[in-house]
Amino acid sequence: MTSRILSTAILGAVMIFLIGPFFIIVAASLSAGETLAFPPQGLSFRWVLKVFEIESFRSSFAMSMMLAVFGTLAALLIGTPVSYALARYKLPLGETIRTIVSAPIIVPGIVVGLALLRYLVIPFGFNLTLALFMAHTALVLPYAVRVVSASMTNLRSDIEEAAVLLGCSRLGAFLRVVLPNIRGGILAAFILGFVTSFNQVPVSLFLSGPGIRTLPIDMLAYLETTYDPSVAALSALLAFMSIGIVFLAERFLGFSRYV
């Protein structure tokens, strides 16, 4: 009985530690006061509405959406064939390739951002938008490979072989048999990559410049000059967006099967 009470207390403390900051941000975003504070000074939705009036938030949101969508799509275009090769063939350097592909997860994002800035942007004058796109694609690639690989492993290889024996080419079997059967894994990888890219801070911090900012970086810059609850309101909206995406993914795709 004592151990059960202790386990419940520890679980409750962990839940409060994990979810508590989210409720604090939501409460602060509904404050009627002029500064970011908790507990809120009255209740008002004016800071939530103000988020949509700030032009820099709108432009940086569009930039983050573009990077998240196209960076994740690029990662999937690269990662899906890699996952197929790793799952179907015994490559001599298979484990080494897996380790290299996982490097963007292992290496701190701040190191990746500094390296791209130092060796691409500064010496060669790379366009910052292009550098951001490359960085976000590289950061999302490990998730694409791992999630699609998990889906590929669960697909029986004899289904593909049967299609080949019936006269389908290897490429045709991949397009007509393999891809339709792993579409759930691909969609799960896209959602995971999208959320990861959209909320990326360390890499984007080094590769941002005048007129080129992702939304998290723009929020940091806004806090340097203004301390009103609008950033809390935007944070709450983004949190609800992420929760909604993951909930829908779990509801319709069984997201937890792939991650």
Image (cartoon, helix red, strand yellow):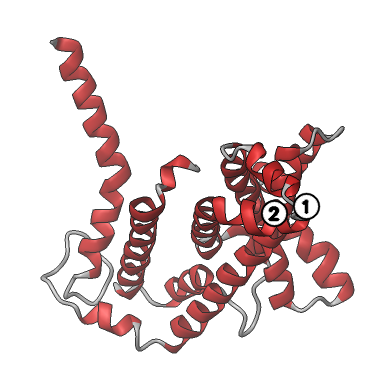
**Is disc 1 surrounded by few (<14), some (14 to 19) or many (20+) residues within 10 Å?**
some
Residue labelled with disc 2: 174
Q: How many marks?
A: 2
Q: Residue at x 27, y 38 (%)?
A: 15
**Is disc 2 surrounded by few (<14), some (14 to 19) or many (20+) residues within 10 Å?**
some
Residue 224 lies, in percent from the top left, at 46, 72
Q: Residue at x 56, y 43 (%)?
A: 151
- What is the secondary structure assignment of the residue under circle 1? helix
Amino acid type at image mark 1 = Arg
Please determine whether, in this image, residue 135 is positioned above or below residue 162. Answer: below
Residue 160 lies, in percent from the top left, at 67, 45
Determine which quarter of the picture holds residue 234: bottom left
Q: Are marks 1 and 2 in contact (CB under 8 Å)?
A: yes
Amino acid type at image mark 2 = Phe
The tag on residue 170 is: 1
Residue 163 lies, in percent from the top left, at 69, 49
